[in-house]
Image (cartoon, coloured by chain):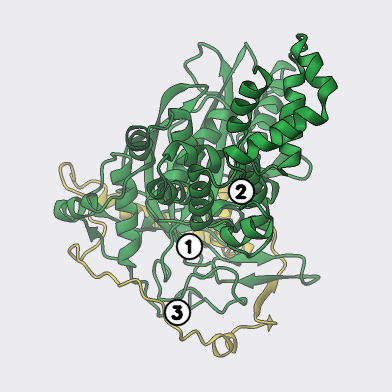
Chain colours: A yellow, B green
Amino acid sequence: MKISEEILNNISSLSKIRIDEKIKSDLVKDLESILEMVGEMNKIDTSGIEPMSHPLEEADNLRKDKATKEIKRDEYQKSAPQTDDGFYLTPKVIE
Amino acid sequence: MNNTWESVIGLEVHVQLSTESKIFSNAPTKFGQTQNSQASLVDLGLPGVLPVLNEKTIEMAIKFGCAINANISSKAIFARKNYFYPDLPKGYQISQLDDPIVGEGKISIEVDNEEKFIGITRAHLEEDAGKSLHDKYENLSAIDLNRAGTPLLEIVSEPDLRSAKEAVAYLKKIHSIITFLEISDGNMSQGSMRCDANVSIRKYGDKEFGNRTELKNINSFRFVEKAINYEINRQIEIIENGGSIDQETRLYDANKDETRSMRSKEHANDYRYFPDPDLIPVKISKEKIQEIQKTLPELPEQKISRFIKDYKISEYESKNLNVSKELSGFFEKVAKKISSPELAAKWILGDLMAILNKNNSEIKDSKISSKDMIDLLSRLEEGSLSGPGAKKIIELCWSSNESIDVLIKKEGFDEVKGEDELLEIITKIIRDNSKQFEQYLNGKDKLFGFFVGQVMKETKGNADPKLVNELLNKKLKQ
């Protein structure tokens, strides 16, 4: 599969990763070779095989509905770049 | 109603499940708490934490599935829905794509006395996001993650609805099912039930759907109707003027009663769903489903028929009493304690509802308890309180903290006049109003009402109007 500039820009915007103009042509080559490798796997006949969503068997690792009283907000907020009045602060983002 | 254009509506309803802890963490889910005081390390999306599924959410989803006779999946798989937004710290929402826990089902609604079935495509479990506040700081957004990780059941309907009215009926039905099942408090003003509407129009008879718009986050029954109607008219106007509808997300602005474009689907969000490797698929056994099926409470439709049968009330009354679990419970408590359940239905749907509406209250916040109602109606039944007296007492009961008995005594309503006393009063009134009496005897029948009024005035309403009529009839015709 060919990676066009448009596809590259779309991936960049979806992943919120800025791509330097200078590396774009190299990146396109890399991505194309990865897709080619994945394309190899598409040649395998998987008809009749149930898709696996997880390598582990289905299990009953469920939690009882009990709430903790141990929420250490002030401690958690120490690792945030900016907080005030108990809020986490981010650059203004409005969708 | 428009004769050319048919509207096609599908709803996505998000129901907040009333669990004690969140869906993937043990943080509490209480509403209205201090910012970020209900957000655990898992909800904050810190590196290295792992989600563990709350078993109650699975049970609640199965309950809903059983109630609408839907297929329940034998396994539930959770997937990551990827997008970036500050109130979603992980960068993905854990949701379901393939194998939703609840598959196809059906819900019946009634509009203008006609029953209609609305298909349910699916219902799946997912976590809620946090909240962003944009007006607190000038160049910053303030993030409160208390809501992050709250369990949601998203119920998706087929595009089977054909008017805003049907959409409201459908939403009310979902509301009654989830509240009767007690899987959610259904409180729309607190966001426990939110709704997105997909709306398109097409010419009657057309098979193809038109381009649809998605109306986001509508949070009351009234706004659902208004938002959809606004959107239908907007689309008709555009198409009739030769335009076309863009597939987009629109936000309903209740203040301006209009919808406006939120984000264009041109750059359609590509959520890049994939199975969440942190969560092992949950196996749901037939035994588990059967076990839950057995614990299913009586649902609105079953209650409606039982009330008609057991309490001999009308279908209309039974339906209105079963709009909520609280109201139907209130009625049943009262109906069981007095001899005439019809009287209970009449007073609860009549006077009590009027008082609640006047005070913008719901039955669960009623200051008139079921015990008050039992006391009041028992007095009415035994004839020691008159209808007008009871009306006054029920009003006073709302505004004071006194019991019915105390109020009756205080207001002097415990002196309902007996037959002998009434006859005495009537004799006196006839004597005092001899002119009117003469006119009545000469055929001025209308004056009967005058005499009833005089008696009620004299007794200050402490008389049974039926008895007054009866006695007056006898006396005046002697």
Q: Secondary structure at mark 2?
A: loop
Q: Chain of mark 2?
A: B
What residue lies at 49% left-to-right and 43% top-to-bottom?
A: B381
Depth check, front residue: B54 or B270: B54
Q: CA distance from mark 3 to mark 2?
A: 34 Å
Q: CA distance from mark 3 to mark 1?
A: 13 Å
| Image location (x, y in percent) of residue A12 | 56, 58
Q: Are marks 3 and 1 on the same chain?
A: yes
The residue indicated by pointer 2 is B219
State which tag comes first along the sequence, 3 or 1: 3
Amino acid type at image mark 3: Pro
State which tag comes first along the sequence, 3 or 2: 3
State which tag comes first along the sequence, 2 or 1: 1
Q: Secondary structure at mark 1?
A: strand
Q: In the rendered image, is residue B128 in sight?
A: yes
Depth check, front residue: B442 or B77: B442
The residue indicated by pointer 3 is B47
| Image location (x, y in percent) of residue B68 | 33, 40
Amino acid type at image mark 2: Asn
Q: Chain of mark 1?
A: B
| Image location (x, y in percent) of residue A78 | 59, 89
The residue indicated by pointer 1 is B92
